Amino acid sequence: MTSSKMAAAATSVSTDDLAQFILNTLDRDGAIASSADLRFQGQQVENQALHGALTSLERREMITYETIEFDKWVLTAEGADIEANGSHEAKVFNAIPADGLAIGDLGKKVGAESAKIGQGKAFKNKWIGKGKDGKLVRLVATIRDVTQEDLATIKKTHAHSDAKVLAELKKRKLCDKEKVTHYRVAKGTHFSTVIVKQATDLTVDMLLSGSWQNLDFKKYNFDALGQEPSGGHLHPLMKVREEFRQIFFEMGFEEMPTNRYVESSFWNFDALFQPQQHPARDMHDTFFLKNPATSNRFPKACMEQVKQVHSTGGFGSIGYGYDWKEEEAEKLLLRTHTTAVSSNMLYKLAHQEGGFTPAKYFSIDRVFRNETVDATHLAEFHQVEGVIADVGLTLGDLIGFINVFCQKMGVTNIRFKPAYNPYTEPSMEIFSYHQGLGKWVEIGNSGMFRPEMLGPLGLPDNVRVIAWGLSLERPTMIKYGIDNIRELLGHKCDLEMIQKNPICRLDKKMGREN
Amino acid sequence: MPTVNVDQEYLFKALGRKYSTDEFRELCFEFGIELEEDTSELAMAIEQIGEAAARAQGLSDKPLYKIDIPANRYDLLSPEGIARSLKIFLGQGKPPAYTVRKPKGGKLQQIIVKKETAQIRPHVVGAILRDVTFTPEMYDSFITLQDKLHNNICRKRTLVAIGTHDLDTIQGPFTYEALPPSQINFQALNQPKALPCPELFEHYRTKDKHIGKFLHIIENSPVYPIILDAKRVVCSLPPIINGDHSKITLKTKNVFIECTATDLTKAKVVLNTMVATYSQYSATPFTVEPVEVIYPDGKKYTYPDVAPRRMEASIDYITSAIGVKLTPAEVVHHLERMSLGATLTKDQKTVLVDVPITRSDILHACDIMEDVAIAYGFNKIPKTLPAVNTVGKPFPINKLSDQIRRELALAGFSEVLPLTLCSHDENFAHLRQPDNGLAVELANPKTVEYQVVRTSLIPGVLKTLRENKSRPLPLQVFEVSDIVERDETQERRARNERRVCIAYANKKSAFEIIHGMLGRVMAMLNVPTTQYAIRESMNESFFPGRRAEIVYNGNVIGHFGIVHPEVLGHFELALPVTLLEMNLEPFL
């Protein structure tokens, strides 16, 4: 039977009917040793349908079954022909009459193929030879066509006792091997010849009628996955941002208005006491703007103070001693850090009605660096920044505060390294001990703003400002085990990554940490 | 951050003991420098060019520390400087006192400045180190430090350029002039023969990129700065190259250092750094012979000025800013460990600090305070919490954005975060929009596709969809983020605007779904249908007849529709996309 015919037969068999047939057979015979012998509606049962019926019955524990797999030998088309009409050599032998046959006539009698293959073989078997007149003649009276016999055995039993024969015939492409699956079936613990209809779900009708009490519920496959919900998802980076926001709110911080990507060099650099020849102000690191290119609209009184403190000093400083140029401060750029906004906020804090009041500010927003993009660098990323301004703050306050902040982030082992930053003094790099790497790694920066920076912004002498910052991407990549920053931020990120990543738990191990 | 390679054996000898890698890393950490790598010349070369090639060069495998130095500590840019500072930090020595010593007979070497130099490089300073004994190691350090200074404080020789000469090969008084290139012809350092200046420049431009990269500093000037001796031997052509005639060799005894500059403050720092680092090799260590610079107006200056700079800081300021209790004597002790000479005023309330020439980074009392904190140990400072009571508060537009983001996710859309920077075409032509002049344009992007700051969220969202084409359909995404538009009413002449973009991509378009999302957003913003309307629009980014504008309180605040097939084509999308973009700020 060809497979298409089998499929056609299978479609006509209902699983319910087939299941009932199996139950009846079991009831009658006690067991089914091999499904090979089953004949349902006069036909052999196709395996797929049979398997469906068996699993359905097994789930109800009405039967048990096991799979029997073995090899089945079948004849190829050529093999079937030989089985029916004899081997080529037998055909040749039979075609030769008692007085011999001219070689040229053999093809006409047995066909070209049999003539070609059979002649050699018949010679080799010493069945035929060449007569004195050159004709083919029989050398023996009778022959035994072993090939035909072997093929007949295979056809009948789908096997042969001699493995060498099978190998030889397979090599001659006269027979081939197929994998066959049969089933051995026995009665199950809940065997019955009556199939009770099973319910899969509890329905309104069942509740109304009370039928649920008598219904047999289909056994649930607890190994299968549930259905995926169709809801939307928040981006992992934004989940981490949310956690940081919560920490800041818990600690009484006000969010800064950082929705301003375009900044002047004045607020981004000069107001932060960053000298105009500072390497960060090179074209290499900063995105300057072509259009609009400059703005001179920063507060002029503040600018004069900034100019003075850079070039000749002031507020207790000797300054940098260089020729400060307003044109440099006017250059517009994409902010390189959110501290550009902090400096502006401190200016506003100093100039607000009623004067300075203590403040705690934070921001989490995008900054821009003119970097060559690679697995760890993007031209834009997010900065997390916190600033505290009050009279008499200390370095101990900063260290203590960062310690609490880090604890809330789940980072417990931190220490501080002296560092350099043009606008903070002291400047401290924050290091945390990385268990996996077995070493201290930098996680952020911190410091106390320089008096040269605070003075020109208008803050009173005794006010000290402490601040710290870190990137948002770095902890996100660590927490979610992401190696390439481009797979986190930007259009190359995979929706599956967004959909499959869990909620952010900064204070707990998430199990994916890099 | 500059990196300095220090021979381990040299350092251990100077510090009087051996360190394990971890021990030395800890010492660096406390002091504020960073042990980058424990390596060797050979190991570094192997990393760069491979084992076989590196070994073939016959490099040394002597252990070497690669140390990162803070960008403002020029005194630490040499092995000598690092060894000396660490030694003092460990309490094993005192900072040296530098003195100037006039030559026998009292007549100083002079550099006479000609007025033409004002056009190109107006300043020069100089100093002489006498009776120096060069060793190969010191010679290497001497060359390397000049290189490091050139790359850092000198801003690649634009601000300051250093020239060093064997004084016994040349004769003062020297002149600092500015001459037209056509009048300059000399044998430059390591050149086989004298060349006219234009030929020399051509050589550097085409055959020697290491020097060629500095040509731009003076190339376009009608005159080039030049230092000549009394016999008009060319000592140097700053900031490009020295003359071969006066070059330093291992046999050199008397070293003439000149620094030409556009920034005089930095020239003095550079000269002082050279003097501070190498005067220890003079027959009388830590002495330097001064040089007189005479300007065209007759003003005379003597360099170097090695006198310490007096600064003061109140003990109360130092201890209260750090948050530790220290006695005045302890403050003095900590400062001394940081190479700062310190004494107390009679009332013990103020510390007087004599800032040595090595510490040009000390500008303010806060720098003194920091050094006390470093010497005390950052990690020993008691942890306190600021006693500042403030009320937490979100920035309103961020709060509103977060609320809307949550609603969009609840409605089945996933949040994406494309970049803010994009190409001009992506922002305009690819969306079938003309350049409306509102985009902020970048002047100097390293990555060519970053030309403008986006004025629409649409390009980024479409690019994200493009990258996710193979994901199961439908694709439902959103972004709530900022675009930037030029705005002449603003101090920075541009402003951010918070926008919402919602997109749906499937085998067929879904105008109703996006229309429904607009309804959902408006419902969540509690905007009744009487306050907003949609009407058919002519927005070219969308498909004719399936495009609408959103009108709120009489203003168009956004658009939605089926994305135009040409736009889809530009973003390599073969799927119908329906999307909405609107301004969120009117709902604040």
Image: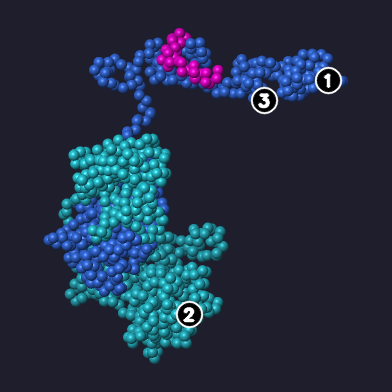
Q: Nearer the viewer, mark 3 or mark 1?
A: 1
Disc on the earlier residue, 3 or 1: 1
Q: Report the disc number at residue A187.
A: none
Tag 2: amino acid:
Ser
Q: Report the disc number at residue A135.
A: 1
- Up/down of A232 relative to B333, above or below: above
Same chain letter for marks 2 and 1: no
A433 or A38, which is in the foreground? Answer: A38
Same chain letter for marks 2 and 3: no
Q: Quadrant of the N terminus of chain A?
A: top right
Question: In the image, what residue occupies the spot 31% across and 51% down?
Answer: B455
Give the residues drawn in magenta, as a range. Answer: A1-30
Residue at the bottom extreme, as displayed: B105
Examine the structure image and report whether residue A16 is included in the region drawn in magenta.
yes
Q: Where in the figure is residue A413, as x and y percent of width and height? A: 31, 52
Badge 2 marks a residue whose secondary structure is helix
Distance between the alpha carbons at the discs numbered 2 and 1: 112 Å
